[in-house]
């Protein structure tokens, strides 16, 4: 276990906010969690994965616990393994499952909390088991993903179980049998554009997904962001009809609003709404609505403050609300 007081978190959050925590604790082995005197730590205690889905709104008064367990046994990966390293490994081994999730920032532990998803696949589709330290019972437990109440970018770990479990390893369900998922977000088209014919492999799909993401999303090595900042709203048919009417006033009577049917409700891309409101590329200080994918807010200058990110977030929420009467909710956790 490594302990760092008054620790600079700027390299541990992908938004690159320059904030500090009272104590940063790095756990490298499961046993260290058993020995930890939780009550003696600066409070509150928060588990941090890759820091890729949160916005620090200021210094953190308590302890940040990073589970830096980097083991691999079969299809079981330590919580600290970079999720895309796992994706790369699976593709290289010819194993199907996570290829559509390639290049999502973050770590394996967080994949099971956030139910990360992209291009028609969610983490829940490939998680077979979760190992965690139960702070309430003071022991390690195996959690069945069926008990995790997975939904769109959410799970019981974010609601009822918040703060209770510290995930130390995730077992994934991988398959040697081909199971390509191509019918979402232009994957098939992008695959055709590569000119590939013949049998598909996970590596081919992975490369295709990486190509799509590189075109749309900021390169995390260059530009700070937390990926999608907002969730896509899921609205009623009546609300959708209103959105269509407004869109046709703006864009002509034949205009088609992009959408996906979700049971009896309709998911409308927040990116589309934000674009229609004229926010693409909007700047506030060092923060910017990313021009290629306006669902993402970026730390464009590298020096953006939490206040600037939040200010831009509020402008987007207010603008979309004023035009469509729909309230966008951030996907990024504010800490
Ligand atoms: N669109 C626009 N203008 C734009 C960009 C997009 O109108 O400038 C519209 C288009 O109609 C497009 C639609 O938005 O078809 C959807 O765009 P995209 O395929 O980029 O996906 P998204 O719904 O904006 C979600 C995830 C992404 C994930 C992609 C692909 C959420 C919050 N985000 O974005 O996840 O990569 O689908 O599956 O659900 C992340 O969570 O960090 C993330 C990047």
Image: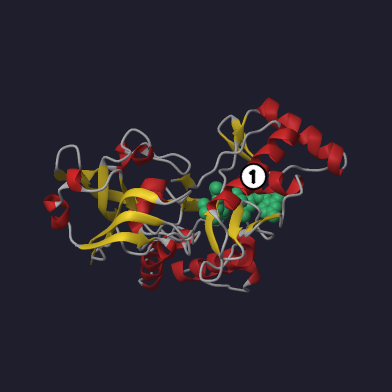
Colour scheme of this structure image?
Answer: secondary structure
Comparing 73 with 15, the one in front is 15
Residue that numbered label 1 is attached to: 270
Residue 309 visible to the viewer: yes
Comparing 47 with 97, the one in front is 47
Q: Is residue 129 above or below residue 203?
A: above
Counting every numbered tag in the picture gives 1
Where residue 1 sits, quadrant-wise, is: bottom left
In the shown orientation, is residue 260 left or right of residue 209? right
Mark 1 beta carbon near ligand 1 (under 8 Å) = yes
Q: Is residue 323 above or below residue 181?
A: above
Q: Is residue 331 above or below residue 98?
A: above
The spot of residue 46 in percent (x, y) is 32, 48
Where residue 169 sits, quadrant-wise, is: bottom left
The spot of residue 133 in percent (x, y) is 20, 47
The spot of residue 119 in percent (x, y) is 54, 54
Identity of the residue drawn at 83% across and 38% down? 248
The spot of residue 191 in percent (x, y) is 60, 66
Where residue 138 sits, quadrant-wise, is: top left
Identity of the residue drawn at 42% across and 65% down? 11
Residue 172 visible to the viewer: no
Mark 1 residue element: helix
Residue situated furthest right in the rendering: 252
How many other residues sit within 10 Å of disc 1, few (<14), some (14-19) or many (≥20)? many
Identity of the residue drawn at 66% across and 53% down? 294
Comparing 318 with 186, the one in front is 318
In the shown orientation, is residue 244 left or right of residue 92? right
């Amino acid at each position: 276990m490594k302990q760092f007081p008054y620790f600079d978190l700027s390299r541990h959050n992908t938004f690159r906010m320059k904030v500090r925590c009272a104590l940063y604790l790095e756990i490298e082995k499961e046993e260290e969690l058993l020995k930890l005197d939780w009550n003696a730590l600066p409070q509150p205690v928060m588990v941090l994965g890759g820091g890729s889905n949160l916005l620090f709104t200021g210094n953190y008064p308590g302890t940040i616990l990073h589970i830096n367990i980097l083991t691999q046994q079969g299809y079981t990966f330590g919580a600290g393994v970079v999720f895309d390293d796992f994706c790369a490994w699976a593709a290289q081994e010819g194993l199907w499952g996570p290829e559509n999730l390639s290049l999502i920032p973050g770590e394996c532990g967080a994949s099971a909390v956030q139910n990360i998803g992209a291009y028609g696949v969610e983490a829940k589709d490939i998680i077979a088991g979760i190992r965690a330290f139960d702070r309430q019972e003071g022991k390690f437990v195996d959690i069945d993903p069926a008990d995790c109440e997975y939904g769109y970018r959410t799970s019981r770990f974010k609601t009822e179980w918040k703060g209770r479990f510290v995930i130390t390893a995730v077992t994934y369900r991988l398959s040697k049998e081909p199971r390509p998922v191509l019918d979402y977000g232009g994957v098939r088209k992008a695959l055709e554009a590569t000119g590939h014919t013949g049998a598909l492999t996970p590596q081919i799909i992975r490369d295709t997904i990486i190509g799509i993401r590189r075109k749309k999303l900021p390169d995390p090595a260059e530009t700070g962001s937390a990926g999608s900042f907002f969730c896509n709203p899921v609205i009623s048919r009546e609300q959708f009809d209103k959105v269509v009417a407004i869109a046709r006033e703006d864009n002509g009577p034949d205009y088609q609003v992009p959408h996906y049917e979700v049971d009896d409700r309709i998911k409308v891309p927040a990116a589309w709404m934000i674009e229609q409101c004229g926010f693409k590329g909007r700047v506030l200080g060092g923060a910017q609505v990313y021009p290629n994918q306006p669902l993402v807010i970026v730390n464009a200058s590298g020096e953006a403050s939490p206040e600037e990110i939040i200010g831009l977030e509020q402008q987007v929420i207010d603008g979309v609300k004023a035009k469509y009467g729909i309230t966008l909710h951030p996907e990024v956790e504010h800490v």
